[in-house]
Image (tube, rainbow, N blue to C red):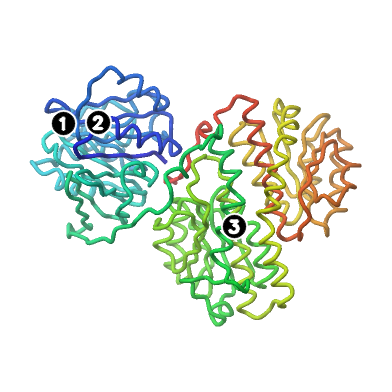
Amino acid sequence: MCGIVGYIGDGNATEIIIDGLKKLEYRGYDSSGIAVYEDHKILVEKVKGRIANLEEKIKDKKFTSHVGIGHTRWATHGAPSDVNSHPHSNMDNSIAVVHNGIIENYIELKEWLIKNHNIVFRSETDTEVIAHLISVFYEDDLTDAVYKAVEKMRGAYAIGVVSANEPDKIVAVRRDAPLIAGLGDGCNFIASDIPALLKHVRKIYLIENNETVVLTKNDVKIYNADREEVKRDVFNVTWDADAAEKEGYDHFMLKEIHEQPKGISETLNRRLDEDGMIKLDGIKLSKNDLEKFNKVYIVACGTAYHAGLVGKFIIEKLAKIPVEVDVASEFRYRDPFVDENTLFIAISQSGETLDTLAALREAKSKGARILSVVNVVGSSVARESDDVFYTWAGPEIAVASTKAYTTQLVCMYLIALYMAKTKEIIEKELYDKYIEELKEIPEKLNTILNKEQDIYEMAKDLYKREQVFFIGRGPDAGVSYEGSLKLKEISYINSFAIAAGELKHGTIALIEQGTLVIALATQDKLFEKMLSNIQEVKARGAYVIGLAKENNKDIETQSDRVIYIPQCMDEVSPLLSVVPLQILAYYISKLRGCDIDKPKNLAKSVTVE
């Protein structure tokens, strides 16, 4: 969470930093601020609310500084307020800090600073501790002071620091939170993510864990924890800056829903040769490797976890290996049964999700083989994995994930098929059928997207509801969880998903006259079972929206409204069925007047526990 931008060069630092912060607002948006070197001192301006509030506050100030740092916040320590906003300063305002992450021992450090150095704190944040700590250690060398402060700090964080005494540099540190450095011509940058810098640079350094980076306008130097300089290859960003813009759509979420056919095509076609054989490039999983694995763990958070639920279904079905799906935040605290015969699959859109990264490290320490599915090249999860399967979704800006989910699903299908083919346990005819079905998904998705207006009309009748239940069986159950999450996170409707067969074990007590139930019934083998479950909720007065394949018209006899998806194999239906649910959630949220791309209390990249 939180977004950091720093700039040093000949341009107007304030304008460049604010422009970069706007590109990172998906990481947090309850407050923002900047610190710039102006008139031989550090000037800090910060305010509660969106970046537009910050722009309004400083619009009449004639900042001319060429160096500064900025921050957009997702609150952890201290409620959103002007005072708790970043940047934070030391007592004489000569040092300013921006921070993404958490300092776990901040109370201990705060008490030490108060007792031994008479520090007076202004905010409730853990970040302010960093500014005072650096100040205590400062002796005419900002880099040295930062190193000494970091030695005292525990937690996961990235920080950027400026000092009025050394206005020719920015010092930044990465520890378990994302940080990059951008390389310009007579200017350099730091940021939490690539979109903040694309307007200005294409060459970046991916800062590794426990590294310190020192920027001047003409140089960027990286040092390890032992203060030794590290040489780093330049990473060239190849995707278009326009990919991070709305391009005429009202919201990033709607744009990204419509980008799913392309994202799926890219993810699929980059992994298939002319004969339809799956090529995993740098991933080397041999038949011996796969036969050695006696268990697969899929570990992820949120939407990626829901992709893992579908992944479990398809890997077990095709590769015949037991799969356990676990929430990353719970995995490492229960001493999981992991060893060298375990394949650990980490799924993360950003590749920086802290819980997933921590779970990965736990599994790796026990000897597991690590395969990651990520969207961001060079991310932490990717760098710490043995094998990486990149999705090709392109940048995803909306907090509510859409195209990342469907491209993750494609990866799950390809991994399962590759395993089955390599183990020689799938017939060629069936393998070819799966490949053809996957190739047809983008065009079938376009068919669904062309009916967007119909779903909008349905949303008009539903947006005032305050409680919704999603039900399904088999892979539909996993999609139900994702559909429910999409609705609740952007519309704030109390939405709940459950496997349909579990309804009668308690949850059906909540069904009453007019309760909205969205019933997924895309599995031909389970269709009659789902009709029975729909009858159960209808008997209690539920208003049912059924979702089925277009040939299963019998669902109309049990549902009040029906959404149809094109015909497909049962197994690949999640790639289609989730999209109407995304569209429905989008329009319900829009009709309720919600901030779709920036839902309250949420952020895109979760880099704290």
Q: Mark 1 points at which residue?
A: 94
Quarter holding residue 98: top left
In front: mark 2 or mark 1?
2
Element on which disc 3 rests? helix
Q: Nearer the viewer, residue 585 or 149?
A: 585
Q: Mark 2 points at which residue?
A: 35
Q: Is residue 233 above or below residue 188?
A: below
| Disc marking residue 265 | 3
Q: Position of residue 508 (x, y in %)?
A: 80, 40
In front: mark 2 or mark 3?
3
- Residue beneath the point at 34% across and 28% down: 85
User: Which tag, 1 or 3, sits closer to the chain's start?
Assistant: 1
| Disc marking residue 353 | none
Classify mark 2: residues with Cα within 10 Å, few (<14), some (14-19) or many (20+): many
Query: Given the image, on which type of amino acid does mark 2 rest?
Result: Ala
- Residue beneath the point at 34% across and 48% down: 155
Q: Where is residue 529 in the image (x, y as percent from the top left)?
A: 85, 53
Q: Which residue lies furthest to the top in this view?
A: 60
- Residue beneath the point at 41% across and 38% down: 23
Q: Position of residue 72 (x, y in %)?
A: 37, 34
Element on which disc 1 rests? loop
